[in-house]
Amino acid sequence: MYHGRISWGGSSWTWYSEKVLPGGGLNIPGRHVDEDGFVCDENGYICLAADGNYIAYGTVIDTPLGRPGKIYDCGCDYGTVDVYVSW
């Protein structure tokens, strides 16, 4: 995480703090922060954002973080995936 950006699986992975987009900013069922500081949904998927033409809303994907994530938002550059965190 201290790198700020990770290149993995053909994507550029960056961090997006929920302090910028707090609690109700996105419609994420069961939104919570897990023990690792990731914003997750009710199923434990890490909440992610990506350009809708790159990865469609609602898609579950593998992450470089050791567990899957789900796309809940757009607005990233094509080829970039934002990981929602609490820090």
Image (spheres, helix red, strand yellow):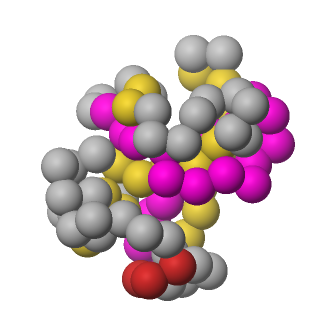
Residue 81 against residue 18 in the figure, above or below: above
Residue 1 showing in the rendered view: no
Among all residues in the image, which is located at the extreme right?
Answer: 77
Along the horizontal axis of the image, is 19 left or right of 76? Answer: left
Please state which of residues 64 and 54 is positioned toward the viewer in this rendering: 54
> Residue at image x 72%, y 41%?
51
Confirm whether the magenta stretch covers residue 83: yes
Among all residues in the image, which is located at the extreme top?
Answer: 9
Measured as percent of width and height from the top left, residue 12 is found at: 69, 32
The number of numbered badges drawn on the structure is 0
Along the horizontal axis of the image, is 41 left or right of 12? Answer: left
Q: Quadrant of residue 35?
A: bottom left
Measured as percent of width and height from the top left, residue 79 is found at: 75, 29
Measured as percent of width and height from the top left, residue 24 is found at: 44, 83
Measured as percent of width and height from the top left, residue 83 is found at: 52, 51
Along the horizontal axis of the image, is 4 left or right of 86? Answer: right
Please state which of residues 5 and 81 is positioned toward the viewer in this rendering: 81
Residue 26 showing in the rendered view: yes
Confirm whether the magenta stretch covers residue 50: no
Residue 60 against residue 36 in the figure, above or below: above
> Residue at image x 49%, y 53%?
72
> Residue at image x 28%, y 45%?
45
Residue 39 against residue 58 in the figure, above or below: below
Residue 1 against residue 6 in the figure, above or below: below
Query: In the image, which residues are magenta?
Result: 68-87
> Residue at image x 19%, y 58%?
42
